[in-house]
Amino acid sequence: MWRNDPAGLPGIAAFAIGLLFFLVVALLAARRRAGAEARGNATRSRRSMLGIAVQALGVVLAGAGRIDVTLDPLGTTAWAEATIVALLMAGTVGLFTWASRTMGRNWSIVARTRDDHRLVATGPFAIIRHPIYVALFLLMLAMAIAYGHVSHLIGAIPLYAIGTWLRIGEEERLLGALFGGAYDDYARRVRRFVPGVF
């Protein structure tokens, strides 16, 4: 359907190493949350679960297909690609780690509130409202570049965006219901994805 660009082993290695770090950080965050989950009553959202599925389709589309490893592994193009992938994965891991630690036991995969939920407006949440979705978007970009699937982003980005809008709509509704004016004030001050822009 879409053409594949040449990929290089350095870029694929940079993505694999970054993905390993991301998975370790995500497992540690889930482990921290597991203990907290038992201590509060949670209301989960089905719309959020649908958003997760649509986002996942976008990410899968970005990485699916044949990988043409034809770039000279010692060439400038392969190392430029690897540098871009490494920077995107560093952003992914750093932003996800910062956000999940700042959220503490409020962090979860599916949108939900707890009876002891607090409004988090510090750390990366003082800059953007949805840093974890930005981190996952960076991961998707890194994978597409590393695998030579940049053209796949034509379909992957809209799917990821639809899934993200489903999720943030539900999260913002839940937080608005729980925190009222305090959340409205926060939402007026802090943009969703790009500081001061969007």
Image: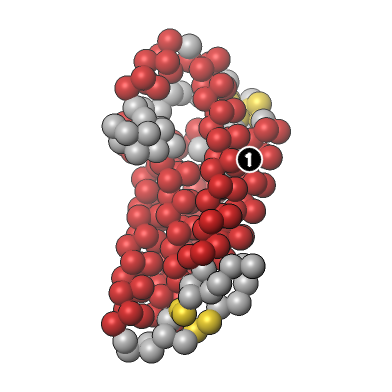
Q: Residues within 10 Å of mark 1 (few under 14, many from 20)?
A: many
Q: Residue at x 52, y 68 (%)?
A: 149
Locate the N terminus and report the quarter of the image it occupies: bottom right
Q: How is the image coloured?
A: secondary structure
Q: What residue is disc 1 on?
A: 51
Q: Residue at x 51, y 17 (%)?
A: 176
Q: Is residue 93 above or below residue 51?
A: below
- Which of the 4 image quadrants contains residue 138? bottom left
Q: Is residue 45 left or right of residue 135?
A: right
Residue 64 horizontal/vertical position (percent): 62, 67
Q: Is residue 53 left or right of residue 100?
A: right
Q: Is residue 181 above or below residue 67?
A: above
Residue 21 horizontal/vertical position (percent): 44, 63
Residue 135 horizontal/vertical position (percent): 43, 50
- Which of the 4 image quadrants contains residue 49? top right
Q: Residue at x 52, y 21 (%)?
A: 175
Q: Is residue 10 above or below residue 115?
A: below
Q: Secondary structure at mark 1?
A: helix
Foreground pick, 157 / 136: 157
Foreground pick, 121 / 102: 121
User: Is residue 185 in view from this perspective?
Assistant: yes
Which residue type carries mark 1? Gly
User: Is residue 21 in view from this perspective?
Assistant: no
Residue 123 horizontal/vertical position (percent): 32, 36
- Numbered disc total: 1
Q: Is residue 117 left or right of residue 159?
A: left
Q: Residue at x 37, y 34 (%)?
A: 198
